[in-house]
Amino acid sequence: MEVRLLVNGKEVRLKDFPQRVLYNLIEGYVKSLNLQEEPRQVEVHVRLKEDHSRDTNL
């Protein structure tokens, strides 16, 4: 299992629990997509809204 989290291009070191949670969340989501081939690597890119601190509907 390899999980990397980058924020603003800088890697954030994850302890075991957050790493497993992120892995299981993404793995479960991808498996639910019924893809035609088995995924080997998954990349997720998220761009936050400019002023997300005031938005309660993230």
Image (cartoon, rainbow, N blue to C red):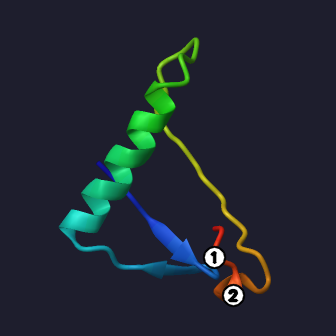
Q: Which residue is labeled 1 in the image?
A: 56
Q: Nearer the viewer, residue 18 or 11?
A: 18
Where's the C terminus, which quadrant? bottom right
Quadrant assignment, res 33: top right
Q: Taking 1 as reference, is 9 left or right?
A: right
Q: Position of residue 17 (x, y in %)?
A: 20, 65
The three-letter code of the residue at mark 2 reads Arg
Q: Is 3 located above or below residue 42 in the figure?
A: below
Residue that sits furthest to the left in the current view = 16
Q: Is 8 located above or below residue 1 in the figure?
A: below
Q: Is 7 located above or below residue 44 in the figure?
A: below
Q: Position of residue 38 (x, y in %)?
A: 47, 20
Contact flag, marks 2 and 1 (Cβ < 8 Å): yes
Image point (47%, 69%), residue name:
5
Q: Taking 52 as reference, is 32 left or right?
A: left
The three-letter code of the residue at mark 1 reads Thr
Residue that sits furthest to the front in the current view = 56
Image point (39%, 47%), residue name:
25
Q: Which residue is labeled 2 in the image?
A: 54
Question: In what element is the residue under mark 1?
Answer: loop
Residue that sits furthest to the top in the current view = 36
Q: Taking 7 as reference, is 25 left or right?
A: left
Q: Position of residue 8 (x, y in %)?
A: 64, 82
Question: In what element is the residue under mark 2?
Answer: helix
Residue that sits furthest to the right in the current view = 50
Cα–Cα span, label 2 and label 1? 6 Å
Image point (44%, 26%), residue name:
31
